[in-house]
Image: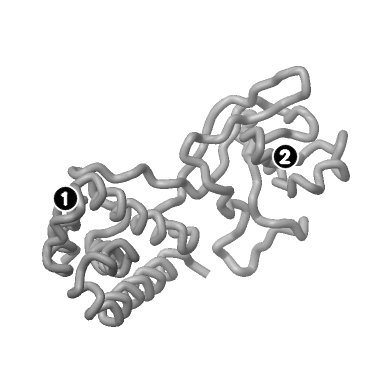
């Protein structure tokens, strides 16, 4: 049976019990520390629960065709592989593409490195991410205007009533992660004394999450 999810408020209550209720910290400060640890966990790897789909219409300007990435875009996710090991993509490139949809057909446009874009000038079928200007630019206007691609998202900050994006069985990782933060170590003798134990529990939860995540990806 799946373990119930916890809200940020419940996680903070567990954390206070873990470090003997640090009254020096305000509720806003505790929530800030929780969110810092939450994002630390979420940036450990491209977790399956952070995968999202972007869809929309290709735009044009004086320079050419482009896409504005979603506001929670972190980076592209692999989306051009085959689960069946007997099949493979034959272009010897990273399996990250933007699909341009024409008459129901999904045509892959290879994502290339920003620094390599000059080698692909006037070559169709390619796009690159301009990080500074936050834009995905096509080297040549695509054959259609509808697009779709997968990406890893940045989860929204938690409010007191929100729950973490990952399953409830792993929510305690945030309790132990908070207990190892420097501000807490400075304020709580209990957190200082139990730092090795709290860190060990944090690392064990992280390993458990990694194993669980690996089972969602079929090789």
**SS for callout 2:** strand
Q: Is residue 208 above or below residue 163?
A: below
Query: In the figure, is residue 100 to the left or right of 219?
Result: right
CA distance separating discs 1 and 2: 43 Å
Q: Is residue 119 above or below residue 143?
A: below
Name the residue located 27 percent from the left edge and 59 percent from the top edge.
167
Seen from the viewer's position, the closer of residues 162 and 182 is 182
Chosen colour scheme: one colour
Residue 101 drawn at (x, y percent): 62, 33
Residue 169 drawn at (x, y percent): 23, 65
Name the residue located 68 percent from the left edge and 27 percent from the top edge.
144
Q: Is residue 59 above or below residue 203?
A: above
Q: Which residue corresponds to mark 2?
A: 127
Dot in front, 1 or 2: 1
Q: Which residue corresponds to mark 1?
A: 9
Picture quarter with the N terminus = bottom left
Query: In the figure, is residue 162 to the left or right of 151?
Result: left
The image quadrant of residue 57 is top right
Name the residue located 87 percent from the left edge and 37 percent from the top edge.
121
Upstream in the sequence, badge 1 or badge 2? Answer: 1
Name the residue located 66 percent from the left edge and 38 percent from the top edge.
132
Seen from the viewer's position, the closer of residues 14 and 148 is 14
Packing grade of label 1 (10 A; few <14, some 14-19, many >=20) is some
Seen from the viewer's position, the closer of residues 168 and 56 is 168
**Mark seen at residue 32:** none
Kindly tell me whether residue 170 is visible in this rendering: no
Residue 25 drawn at (x, y percent): 20, 53
Residue 80 drawn at (x, y percent): 62, 53
């Amino acid at each position: 049976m799946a373990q119930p999810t916890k809200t940020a408020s419940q996680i903070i209550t567990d954390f206070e019990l873990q470090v003997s209720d640090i009254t020096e910290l305000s509720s806003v400060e505790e929530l800030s520390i929780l969110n810092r640890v939450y994002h630390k966990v979420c940036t450990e790897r491209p977790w399956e629960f952070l995968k999202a789909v972007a869809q929309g219409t290709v735009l044009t300007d004086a320079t050419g065709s482009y896409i504005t990435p979603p506001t929670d875009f972190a980076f592209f996710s692999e989306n051009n592989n085959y689960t069946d090991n007997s099949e493979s993509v034959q272009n010897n490139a990273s399996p990250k593409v933007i699909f341009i949809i024409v008459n129901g057909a999904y045509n892959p446009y290879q994502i290339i490195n920003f620094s390599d874009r000059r080698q692909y000038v006037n070559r169709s079928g390619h796009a690159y991410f301009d990080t500074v200007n936050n834009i995905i630019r096509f080297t040549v206007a695509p054959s259609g205007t509808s697009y779709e691609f997968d990406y890893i998202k940045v989860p929204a900050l938690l409010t007191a009533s929100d729950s973490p994006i990952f399953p409830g069985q792993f929510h305690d990782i945030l309790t132990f992660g908070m207990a190892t933060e420097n501000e807490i170590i400075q304020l709580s003798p209990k957190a200082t004394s139990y730092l090795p134990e709290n860190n060990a529990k944090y690392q064990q939860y992280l390993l458990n999450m990694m194993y669980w995540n690996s089972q969602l990806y079929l090789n």
